Image (cartoon, rainbow, N blue to C red):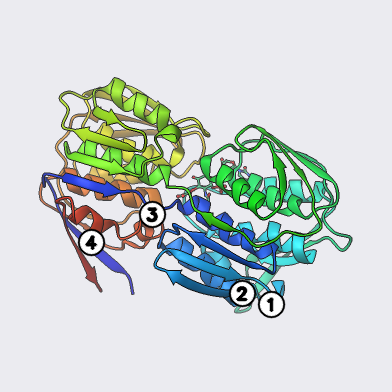
């Protein structure tokens, strides 16, 4: 059963909205709890679809998962078995790739199908495979027969003598690649050095949690991370960092709708480039220590935006910025070199009256400002899901999002929270 959203546009948004915990920190940290048989307690866990699925997979592996409070969960992975990995669930989400590192480190073996997830490009896993093969792990790939046909690949990662600490040089910045190797290296024999390591805040939050578990890690937040393997890790308690992607999305939403909104628990230190870009484009922002107050601005001129690895403007904010660009003066060039399938939401915006030319899979030119009108839309990925909600709030008339699963994967009760600041959004359970 999927829910749909009915959005009435052009409401005046006013009030305070707070940012929840980071989905992209919570997912690797849930996987990391498998590195120990002792209990781990995670607080500020966002109650979103991807996190619920990760917890479900962990439960099916045999872990005890108990919510102590609404967003505080205790995970005890004492009696888990890697062979209990739920292939169907793994097939549905990209984050499930994060189980490889911890399960290999603890058990020396794991069988896992090619992880699924957002339709934002080919999303290969060669960085993970190359890194693990450097660390003494053999990898076999075979087709999984489903109803008589070969439908997906299954990988068998095997380290009978344990994971070996080595130097791993990635071919490009990879968030989950860095996280996977970091987790595997915590229990490896010897020292692992990761070069071209991703530096995103969620990678740093994972490192912080691993250190609380007793891991010996240096250099997180820089492009070289060193990990000295330990014999075992202990349980730990951790408060998941606030989500800089959700914060950025809400700030852009407030600017696009010309609202008067205070975004609280915003990790402003992690959003410097976005905030500079918005300010220099004409947005009216008052930036506090952990909050951003948006007031209605006048003319907006964005000109160009390029998505980049951290500390650049993240690809996960490219789609909300695309919507904002339809309200800016003149031409805006959007360039997202990271994934080749992340401009598809622009076709939906064109259906709403935007003037956008998609030049190639990575670049588009948006002419603005345009009046958007409502429509019936089907966002294909999580960040497009948020972008279409913003578009619906900006547009004249009614916008129907026929399946809100994508936005629900990463934004907790987004409709309810936006209604509290004046949005008119109805959720219908079909
Ligand atoms: N890449 C490869 N080979 C690999 C892995 C990555 O070529 O083995 C390439 C990708 O094709 C892409 C680039 O490297 O061009 C970066 O991909 P990365 O590995 O960083 O992506 P990811 O780890 O799969 C995470 C987030 C994404 C976010 C990207 C970029 C999680 C669970 N996912 O994905 O978040 O867009 O980093 O920052 O942390 C989302 O939250 O909606 C989402 C998709």
Q: Which quarter of the image is occupied by the N terminus?
A: bottom left
Q: Quadrant of ligand 1?
A: top right
Q: Which residue is mark 1?
A: 79
Query: Which secondary structure lies at badge 1?
Result: loop
Asked if labels 1 and 4 touch by Cβ distance under 8 angstroms, the answer is no
Asked if labels 4 and 3 touch by Cβ distance under 8 angstroms, the answer is no
Asked if labels 3 and 1 touch by Cβ distance under 8 angstroms, the answer is no
Residue 256 in picture, x, y percent from top left: 22, 37
**Which labelled disc corresponds to residue 380?**
3
Residue 347 in picture, x, y percent from top left: 31, 44
Disc with the residue nearer the chain's start (4 vs 1) = 4
Q: Which residue is mark 2?
A: 63
Q: Is residue 62 visible?
A: yes
Query: Which secondary structure lies at badge 3?
Result: loop
- The residues tagged by marks 3 and 2 sit, at their Cα atoms, a distance apart of 32 Å
Crowdedness near tag 2: few (<14), some (14–19) or many (≥20) residues, C-alpha within 10 Å: many
Disc with the residue nearer the chain's start (3 vs 4) = 4
Asked if labels 1 and 2 touch by Cβ distance under 8 angstroms, the answer is yes
Crowdedness near tag 4: few (<14), some (14–19) or many (≥20) residues, C-alpha within 10 Å: some
Q: Is residue 156 visible?
A: no
- The residues tagged by marks 1 and 3 sit, at their Cα atoms, a distance apart of 37 Å
- The residues tagged by marks 4 and 1 sit, at their Cα atoms, a distance apart of 41 Å
- The residues tagged by marks 3 and 4 sit, at their Cα atoms, a distance apart of 15 Å
Which residue is painted at 44% across and 32% down in the image?
Answer: 269
- The residues tagged by marks 2 and 4 sit, at their Cα atoms, a distance apart of 35 Å
Which residue is painted at 67% across and 55% down in the image?
Answer: 213
Disc with the residue nearer the chain's start (3 vs 2) = 2
Q: Which residue is mark 4?
A: 5
Please indicate whether residue 22 sits to the left or right of residue 220 in the image: left
Residue 244 in picture, x, y percent from top left: 42, 42
Asked if labels 4 and 2 touch by Cβ distance under 8 angstroms, the answer is no
Disc with the residue nearer the chain's start (2 vs 4) = 4
């Amino acid at each position: 059963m999927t829910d749909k959203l009915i959005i009435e546009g052009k409401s005046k948004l006013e009030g305070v909205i707070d940012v929840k915990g980071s989905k992209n920190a919570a997912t690797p940290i849930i996987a990391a709890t498998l590195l120990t048989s002792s209990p781990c307690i995670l607080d500020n866990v966002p109650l979103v679809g991807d996190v619920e699925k990760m917890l479900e997979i962990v439960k099916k592996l045999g872990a005890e998962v108990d919510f102590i409070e609404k967003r505080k969960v205790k995970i005890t992975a004492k009696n888990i078995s890697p062979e209990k990995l739920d292939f169907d669930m793994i097939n549905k989400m990209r984050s499930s790739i994060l189980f490889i590192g911890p399960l290999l480190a603890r058990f020396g073996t794991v069988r896992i199908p090619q992880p699924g997830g957002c339709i934002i490009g080919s999303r290969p896993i060669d960085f993970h495979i190359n890194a693990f093969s450097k660390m003494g792990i053999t990898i076999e790939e075979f087709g999984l027969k489903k109803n008589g046909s070969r439908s997906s690949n299954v990988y068998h990662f095997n380290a009978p003598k344990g994971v070996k600490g080595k130097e791993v040089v990635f071919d490009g910045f990879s968030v989950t690649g860095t996280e996977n190797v970091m987790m595997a290296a915590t229990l490896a024999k010897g020292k692992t050095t990761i070069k071209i390591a991703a530096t995103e805040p969620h990678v740093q939050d994972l490192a912080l949690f691993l250190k609380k578990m007793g891991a010996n890690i240096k250099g997180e937040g820089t492009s070289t991370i060193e990990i000295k393997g330990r014999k075992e890790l202990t349980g730990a308690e951790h408060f998941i960092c606030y989500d800089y992607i959700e914060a950025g999305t809400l700030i852009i939403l407030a600017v696009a709708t010309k609202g008067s909104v205070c975004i609280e628990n915003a990790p402003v230190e992690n959003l410097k480039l976005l905030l500079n870009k918005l300010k220099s484009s004409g947005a009216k922002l008052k930036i506090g220590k952990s909050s951003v107050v948006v007031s209605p601005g006048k003319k907006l001129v964005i000109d160009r935006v390029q998505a980049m690895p951290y500390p650049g403007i993240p690809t996960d904010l490219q789609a909300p910025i695309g919507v904002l660009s339809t309200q800016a003066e003149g031409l805006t060039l959007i360039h997202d070199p990271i994934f080749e399938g992340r401009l598809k939401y622009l076709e939906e915006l064109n259906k709403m009256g935007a003037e956008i030319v998609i030049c190639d899979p990575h670049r588009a030119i948006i002419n603005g400002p345009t009046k958007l009108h409502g429509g019936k839309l089907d966002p294909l990925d999580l960040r497009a899901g948020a972008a279409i909600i913003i578009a619906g709030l900006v547009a004249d008339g009614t916008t129907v999002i026929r399946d809100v699963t994508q936005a629900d994967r990463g934004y907790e009760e987004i409709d309810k929270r936006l209604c509290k600041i004046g949005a008119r959004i109805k959720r219908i359970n079909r």
